[in-house]
Amino acid sequence: MSKTVGVVVSADSVTVVTAVLSDMESLTVGSLVIIIDCDRVLLGRVVRLARRNIFQDDRVLQRIDYESVKLLEEYGIDAEKLTSMNLARIVILGQVTNNEKIEPSRRPPRLYSPVKLPDKTLLENILRPRSRLVIHVGKLRDLDTVDVYLDAEKLVTHHCAILAATGGGKSWLAGVIVEELAYRTDMSIIVFDPHSEYSSMLVPADEAGVELDEQERKIAEVIASKVKIYVPGRVDSSSIDEVFRRRFGRSRTYSRFGIRPLDVPLSIIVRLLDYYYGLSDTQRRILEEAWHNLIAHGDITDVEELLKIIEEEGRQAAPRGYAGEASLHSLLTKLRLLFENRPFFLTRLVEYYDGLPVRRLDIRELVEEPGVKVFDLSGLDYVDQQALVAVIVDQVLKFVMRHRSNSVLFVIEEAHNFAPSRGDSLSLGPLLKVAREGRKFGVGLLVISQRPARVHPDLLSQCMTQIFKRMVNPNDLKYVRDVLENVDVEDLWELKLLREDEALIVGLAAPLSLLVKVRKRYTAHGGLTPSIANLAETFGVAR
């Protein structure tokens, strides 16, 4: 039988009630409770706890002091129990149906309905999604015997956002979701990693000091075997490789890849040229005309060949005379600089860097091969990162739309850099297209940001599951209040106090809003903040 902890004394609305508690010690802010309203069972969440003195009269209170309280104690009288009342504000999450689902409550509970702690079995049945494919993300924060699962189908196809302040545990939770999907599905998970954090998924967590039992170690090995790291062709990754080797005692394995210039949409080529070198209207017209005619020349694999054809085709579009010739030659110089200086461009059919071959990125393999593909973008500046994300997202979405092949999840770390709320970026358009159209083709987004107020609102509005971790910025908290239904001031206060391993999950992938203690990682976590002492030791700073 469930333990009774209080009774409803007022119903402020259909969704908010106040209860007097007989046992406050069994509850915390965030605890789930059930309210027995005759033939109905309502599930609620505690959002406020308070202790109130029933003698709140100045004439009474002015005669109370510490000595009088001690005198009562000498006679065996507990002054607090005699004069105080414990109150809880409870938000009604829904009504429990006969088949243990949650549906909206359409009338408030009766006064004096008992408030009870929920039964473990009842909670497990309510919280487990009715989907064939679920992922395990942790346990209820206030009842750690109850596992929390999310609907993987809705998480992926309806998109998800993880939002928190820096150091709030975003990457840890993202890693848990990626691990679960990699282990339980055959989908392709493409991670854009601006800070080289996800390479650590190559390593089982017990090699990084996390205790794993025998079964967890086997799961970790399966996940690690499905991880591939991709580094842009001509990026120097020696420092990152050295840090990886020092931390894990093994070399980081990865493939170097390149993008053919012809695989890049002309709009991105134009914007890169304009950003790095400037582009006149005449040069833009020459390039557009020449690029349009490149299709007739077949498969072009060498930059020198490409520039020669652009020169031939561009001469037809250039104005007559010296000015046109000068514009054409200036354009060719800028194109050469762009292709040679941007490290992700493949400039020839056979290319090597640091002893490794640089291979053309195979989009079919990227989509159809199950597992985790981590694109290490840490060696690129912001604009190059945006360009690379735009090209890969665009090509993958087009391939999936044509072939109706494997499901794909894009993991976008630091999403405010790739889809900003103000201004523009090279990657914004392709990401918004996935957000709006990807669901029809099994292509989803996992958007991660420490500044939700700075992420493009159209992108976040398409994320039907949102996971909030610790937040302190007022603008970000205002965003949360605007997004969540039934949000209370105490909910925002709770977000400020969440620990790194705790999260508030709302949306389609969860049966109701949940405060969760996130499970441990099976593979090593790369998003660690180094201590000043360790940095001093690493770089040889004298003490």
Image (tube, grey):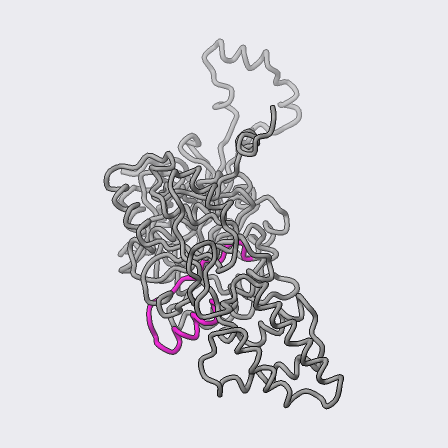
Find out whether residue 75 is within the magenta segment. no
Query: Where in the figure is residue 12, as x and y percent of width and height?
Result: 52, 49
Q: Relative to residue 49, is residue 114 drawn left or right?
A: left
Q: Relative to residue 25, is residue 478 drawn left or right?
A: right
- Residue at the (34%, 55%) spot, across then down: 181
Q: Which residue is more in the foreground, 120 or 384?
A: 384
Find out whether residue 408 is within the magenta segment. yes
- Residue at the (66%, 80%) spot, across then down: 284
Query: Where in the figure is residue 129, as x and y percent of width and height?
Result: 32, 56
Q: Relative to residue 130, is residue 236 drawn left or right?
A: right
Query: Where in the figure is residue 100, as x and y percent of width and height?
Result: 29, 54
Q: Which residue is more in the foreground, 417 or 288?
A: 288
Query: Can residue 265 be seen here?
Result: yes
- Residue at the (58%, 82%) spot, across then down: 310
Number of numbered markers: 0
- Residue 111, compared with residue 398, is above or below; it is above
Work out which residue is located at the far right of the displayed protein and give it.
322
Q: Relative to residue 218, is residue 259 drawn left or right?
A: right
Range shown magenta: 392-415
Query: Where in the figure is residue 444, as x and y percent of width and height?
Result: 42, 64
Q: Quadrant of the N terminus?
A: top left
Q: Quadrant of the C terminus?
A: top right
- Residue 29, compared with residue 80, is above or below; it is below
Query: Can residue 8 be seen here?
Result: no
Choose top left, top right, bottom left or bottom right for residue 200: top left
Q: Which residue is more in the foreground, 156 or 378?
A: 378
Q: Which residue is more in the foreground, 365 or 370?
A: 365
- Residue 221, compared with residue 346, is above or below; it is above
- Residue at the (33%, 58%) spot, across then down: 371
